[in-house]
Image (cartoon, rainbow, N blue to C red):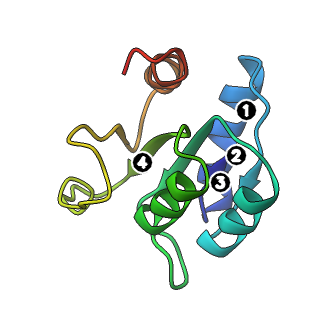
Amino acid sequence: MLVEDDDSVRSIPIIILQFDGYDVVDVTCGEEAIHALETQSFDLLFTDVNLPGDMTGIDVACRARKLNPKIKVLFTTGYMSNDILQNDEFDAKVDLINKPYRKAELLAKVHALLEGDS
């Protein structure tokens, strides 16, 4: 699942991931993400840290892991922030890809996460 509120930014990883053979469900906010997480099973949550509304990407990821402890989480942000690293809900290692990212960088991160190498 991809959580990104900016339509033009969201379209890029959708195209990249679908072209590489991944099924992508995309939503625009934390509330939509939680609804999808409660009704479907996902292997990977790829979420922007900063989302509109009352939930951040960190909040979504915490909820996702409570619903599915095996879900892999990849964060993205256009801002340099230590908020993710200071969250007690996560392991010491957080997977983060900074915007703007390249196609090869995104695919490498996703492959590594889904194959358990991250």
Q: How crowded is mark 3: few (under 14 residues within 10 Å), some or many (20 or more)?
A: few
**Label 4 close to label 2 by CB (< 8 Å):** no
**Label 2 close to label 1 by CB (< 8 Å):** yes
Q: Position of residue 84 (x, y in %)?
A: 27, 57
Q: Residue, x 45% and y 71% (percent of image)?
A: 56
Between label 4 and label 1, give the one nearer the viewer.
4
Q: Residue, x 65% and y 54% (percent of image)?
A: 8
**Label 4 close to label 1 by CB (< 8 Å):** no
Upstream in the sequence, badge 4 or badge 2?
2
**Label 2 close to label 3 by CB (< 8 Å):** yes
Q: Position of residue 115 (x, y in %)?
A: 52, 14
Q: Quadrant of residue 53?
A: bottom right
Helix, strand or loop at disc 4? strand
Helix, strand or loop at disc 2? helix
Residue bearing the label numbered 4? 76
Q: What residue type is labelled 3?
A: Ser
**Label 4 close to label 3 by CB (< 8 Å):** no
- In the picture, the quarter occupied by the C terminus is top left
Q: Is residue 103 above or below residue 48?
A: above
Q: What residue type is labelled 1?
A: Ile
Helix, strand or loop at disc 1? helix
Upstream in the sequence, badge 4 or badge 1?
1
Q: Residue, x 52% and y 25% (percent of image)?
A: 110
Residue bearing the label numbered 1? 15
Q: Which amino acid does label 2 sit on?
A: Ser
Q: Gap between marks 4 and 3, in whole Å?
A: 15 Å
Between label 3 and label 1, give the one nearer the viewer.
1
Q: Which amino acid does label 4 sit on?
A: Thr
Residue bearing the label numbered 3? 8
Q: Residues within 10 Å of mark 2 (few under 14, many from 20)?
A: few
Using the image, tell me which numbered label, if any, was put on residue 27.
none
Residue bearing the label numbered 2? 11
